[in-house]
Image (spheres, rainbow, N blue to C red):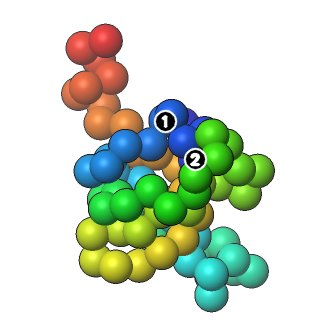
Amino acid sequence: MNGKNRKDISIGAEVKIVLKQDQRSGVLTEGFVKDILTKSGSHPHGIKVRLEDGQVGRVKEVVVDKKLKMKN
C-alpha cells in the first residue's frame, strides 16, 4: 500500500518514510508510527507521520506482514 491515504495508516503500523533531507535521494527509513501528523484524508506526496524514534517524514509505503496478508 502506498502512503497517500490516511485511512491506510494507523498508530503502530510499520511504514517506510522519506525524511525531508532524503527527498532528493529517495532514501527510505523504516519504523513504526507514533503520531499521524497530516489532518486531511489524503496527500499527493504521502501522509506525514512521526515514528516511535521521533523522526518525521512522509509515508511512501505501508509494510504489510505477509503472515497477516495470507490469513485474509
Element on which disc 2 rests:
loop
- Tell me if 9 is positioned left or right of 39 in this view: left
Say which amino acid is labelled 1.
Answer: Asp
> How many marks overall?
2
The residue under label 1 is 8
- Tell me if 46 is positioned left or right of 71 in this view: right
Residue 30: x and y in percent read: 39, 65
Say which amino acid is labelled 2.
Answer: Gly
Going from N to C along the chain, the mark reached first, 1 or 2, is 2
Q: Quadrant of residue 65?
A: top left
Q: Are marks 1 and 2 in contact (CB under 8 Å)?
A: yes
Q: Is residue 48 above or below residue 6?
A: below
Element on which disc 1 rests:
helix
- The numbered dot on residue 36 is none
Residue at the (57%, 57%) spot, across then down: 38
The residue under label 2 is 3
Residue at the (56%, 77%) spot, across then down: 19
Q: Is residue 49 above or below residue 47?
A: below
In the current view of this chain or complex, which residue is farthest to the top? 72
Instruction: Please state which of residues 64 and 44 is positioned toward the viewer in this rendering.
Output: 44
Q: Looking at the image, can residue 2 be seen? A: no
Mark 1 crowdedness (10 Å alpha carbons): few <14, some 14-19, many ≥20 = some
Q: Quadrant of the C terminus?
A: top left
